[in-house]
Image (cartoon, grey):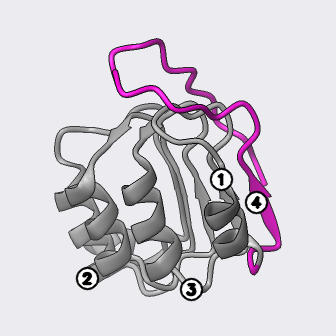
Amino acid sequence: MVRWKELEILEMTWKPDSFVEVLEQIRMNCPNFMGLHICGFFDEEDAQAIVRCLPRLKILVMSGSFVRRRDLMVILDGCKELEVLDVSMCRGFDADSEIVQKASRIRRFECGDSKMESNHTSTMICSLHVF
């Protein structure tokens, strides 16, 4: 991980089982880290790890993922320096007025085609966007 010290943006096609451990390594070894592009099923532990390990995150792209409303709120509350948040085409939440209000400080917030579905086994559409 020592070679990761210059890492600023990480793009992963799919969230690995070791996601929390990867974030811990980034926290300890990547002082200039600013962007994460990733897709998958995100739970409370993942949201808390993003906030704990990457509080100065500028770019977070989770398009096509499954993320519950409460977990998205944890990220919105904890990552105060976000400039780009893409949760478009996600399942697990509707972009209600509270979410939109919390995200209003973010320069580029994308949540189109996200919808409430409680079943995370529905099809996820994972794609990476370059910002």
Magenta stretch, residue numbers: 105-131
Q: Give neighbour class at mark 1: few <14, some 14-19, many 20+ (Cα, 10 Å).
A: few
Q: Quadrant of residue 53?
A: bottom left
Q: Which residue occupies 29% across, 79% down?
A: 52
Q: Taking 108 as reference, is 123 left or right?
A: left
**6 up-or-down from 91: above or below:** below
**Where is mark 2, residue-wise?**
28
Q: Amino acid at mark 3?
A: Lys
Q: Earlier in the sequence, mark 1 or mark 4?
A: 1
Q: Nearer the viewer, mark 2 or mark 3?
A: 3
Residue 1 visible somewhere in the drawing: no
Q: Taking 2 as reference, is 97 left or right?
A: right
**Where is mark 1, residue-wise?**
96
Gap between marks 3 and 1 measured at Cα: 19 Å
Local SS, label 4: strand
Local SS, label 1: loop
Q: Nearer the viewer, mark 1 or mark 2?
A: 1
Q: Earlier in the sequence, mark 1 or mark 2?
A: 2
Q: Give neighbour class at mark 2: few <14, some 14-19, many 20+ (Cα, 10 Å).
A: few
**Where is mark 3, residue-wise?**
80
Q: Which residue occupies 64% across, 74% down?
A: 102
Q: Earlier in the sequence, mark 2 or mark 4?
A: 2
**Where is mark 4, residue-wise?**
109
Gap between marks 3 and 4 measured at Cα: 13 Å
Q: Taking 104 as reference, is 30 left or right?
A: left
